[in-house]
Image: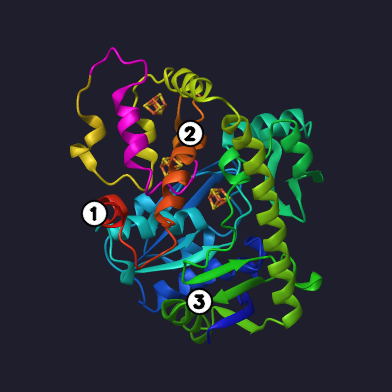
Amino acid sequence: MKGCFIAWATDDATRKRGSSGGFVSAALAAALDSKLVDNVLVLKKTSPYKATQIVTNDPKEVLECAGTLHFVSVNLAKYVPPGRVALPAKPCDAMGIIERAKRGQLDLDDVYMLGLNCGGSLHPKKAKKMVEEMYDLDPDAVIGEEILKGELILKTASGEKALKIDDLEEKGYGRRESCRYCETNIPRMADLACGNWGLPADKLGKATFVEVITDKGEEIFQNAVDTGYVAFEPASDKAIELRDKIDKVMKGLAEKWHKRLFEPIEKLSDSERLAFYVDALSHCIGCGACRKACPVCTCGDSAKCLTEGDSNYKIPLFLMVRLLHLMDSCIGCGRCEDVCPAGIPLTLIHRKFAERMQKKLGYVPGINLDKPPYFEGGRIHEKN
Ligand code: SF4
Ligand code: SF4
Ligand code: SF4
């Protein structure tokens, strides 16, 4: 059963509500229906710009949550409840979950991750501004959105309008900065990897390309088929090739963005670079929102970064400790920057510190299941 398939929800309403044939919602609902899991963690949309994470055991409620959410940037890793649970997981959700599992926050054997291919998400506030300025539309008139073939398509009651994501990003809109250089687009660390990449033209919007990766993935896929929630056919070699090709294009684009955003910092002299960090971080107002939003932060109230420090430093001691402590585990999800009221480019700075360390240690957080986190596992000392 492991391998690649084209799958869709058998129920008409779910198929239509879901952006890619409703497979993920149907498989989640089936898992609840057959008691394969106790709960499903899912985002409930209240508008194209807002969704709240809910934990539910009601298959009907799960099916109602079908649909795209590119304008919402929540990371679900922090909300995984105890017990057997299934959830849709972008690569950064899955990476956060794996890092949390390594820190004893959850048992990975109990978590079914229905991975979602991801080319990026938009910050809701910026998305609204972009809708007004680039699409010349009232943000409240948008009833749906979709990313297809490099375009962001907005749907209103009177029709659709599509603009190239490249053009939006040149104008300072489009995907969050962290998503532009994120190179993990297909979540192969999850149990399934689902998306529309590789679908033949006649199946676009009507089905999902599903890669079944793990035994748990096989279990949840087979369960969805056996309970009649899902139908499927094998993916052709051509579809598999097409998905790989799209993945390569996305990786190439991410590399270009990485160069574009990181090179200017790398080109600075040591003293200029230090001045850049000090200036950026000195705007911190100490609200703690970045720590609360970070999916790999698991220290709780005993966090080292919360220890009172000398308030005369230009950079709060809190941030300096966080930067150092997350060097082994920052997954680049962008949540810290999303929530920072001071507009500090936190993800860029965290990644700048973390990439160097992670490269040196040969440790990719959120991907490798066998290695313990270096700081917590003491591996940093073994290596030196
Ligand atoms: S950081 Fe990567 S995985 Fe997360 S939303 Fe952005 S592109 Fe997707
Ligand atoms: S430091 Fe920021 S980018 Fe890194 S894992 Fe935490 S929230 Fe995500
Ligand atoms: S969210 Fe921004 S302002 Fe608040 S503590 Fe973090 S860095 Fe400082």
Q: Nearer the viewer, mark 3 or mark 2?
A: 2
Which residue type does callout 3 highlight?
Ile
| Mark 3 or mark 2, earlier in chain | 3
**Rendering coords of residue 68 (x, y %):** 61, 54
The residue lying toward the viewer, choosing from 182 and 279, is: 279
Provide the residue span drawn in magenta.
Answer: 310-334
Name the amino acid type tagged 2: Ile
Percent x, y for residue 284? 40, 21
Please state the quadrant of the image where ligand 3 appears: top left
Residue to which mark 2 is pinned: 349
Look at the magenta stretch and give its main secondary structure.
loop
Q: Nearer the viewer, residue 171 or 134?
A: 171
Q: Would residue 243 appear left or right of 313 to someone viewing this image? A: right
Q: Label 3 vs label 1: CA separation?
A: 30 Å
What amino acid does circle 1 point to? Gly
Asked which colour scheme the image uses, the reply is rainbow
Residue 345 x/y as whole percent: 51, 30
Residue underneath mark 3:
213
Numbered mark located on residue 378 in the image? 1
User: Measuring 76% from the left and 51% from the top, which residue is drawn there?
Assistant: 150
Q: Earlier in the sequence, mark 3 or mark 1?
A: 3
Mark count: 3
Classify 10 Å Cα crowding around label 1: few (below 14), some (14-19), many (20 and above).
few
